Amino acid sequence: MSIEIANESGVEVDTDAILAVARYALDEMGVNPLAELSILLVDIDYMAELNHRWMGGDGPTDVLAFPMDEGSVDHGPGEAGTGEPALLGDIVLAPEVAAKQAAAAGHSPADELHLLTVHGALHLLGYDHAEPEEEREMFSLQNRLLQSWRSSRQTG
């Protein structure tokens, strides 16, 4: 799996751990190993601009996901794939927003970035949380992926 990461946020973060949790989540979801993903970490001002331009939101948000080619996502062995690499899309994270949320939630900024990375990856795979049932499914899956990734890091 090809995952590119660029930290343009001006904030020091453990990009290796972000790459690892993204790779773990996509592997667990059965995504084609030839898939490509881009992760971009940005500052508050740029995130606010993206949020306004693409989502119609005001101010910065924590994570945005921009799917590229939904038709090429290989969701696992149950579907016939084309053999072509899937361009999953881009996950954009705002470490400064994540740090504020982490403080409010009582965990580390790194834990918040890991959660947001998995959240963004699930959005790229078509999950959403607009409706209560969708939200329960997505957040339950997100929590399971994070817990199993953390467990694998402690034993590995």
Image: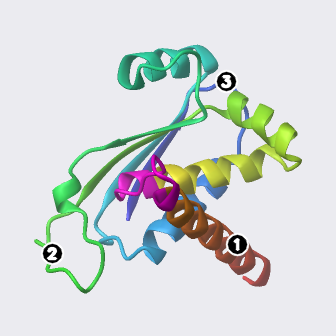
| Residue 101 coordinates in the image, percent (x, y) | 76, 37
In which quadrant will I find the N terminus?
A: bottom left
Residue to which mark 2 is pinned: 81
Residue to which mark 1 is pinned: 147
**Local SS, label 3:** loop
* Span of residues in magenta: 122-134
* Residue at 48%, 51% in the rendered image: 129
Determine whether, in the image, residue 143 is placed left or right of residue 120. right
Q: What's the mark number on residue 45?
A: none
- 64 and 156: which is toward the camera: 64
| Residue 42 coordinates in the image, percent (x, y) | 56, 27
**Local SS, label 2:** loop
Disc 3 to disc 1, C-alpha distance = 29 Å
The tally of labels here is: 3
| Residue 22 coordinates in the image, percent (x, y) | 52, 59
Determine whether, in the image, residue 101 is placed left or right of residue 64. right
Tell me: residue 49, above or below residue 143.
Answer: above
Badge 1, how many Cα within 10 Å: few under 14, some, many 20+? Answer: few
Disc 1 to disc 2, C-alpha distance = 29 Å
Determine whether, in the image, residue 133 is placed left or right of residue 18. left
Question: Which numbered disc flags the more N-terminal residue, 1 or 2?
Answer: 2
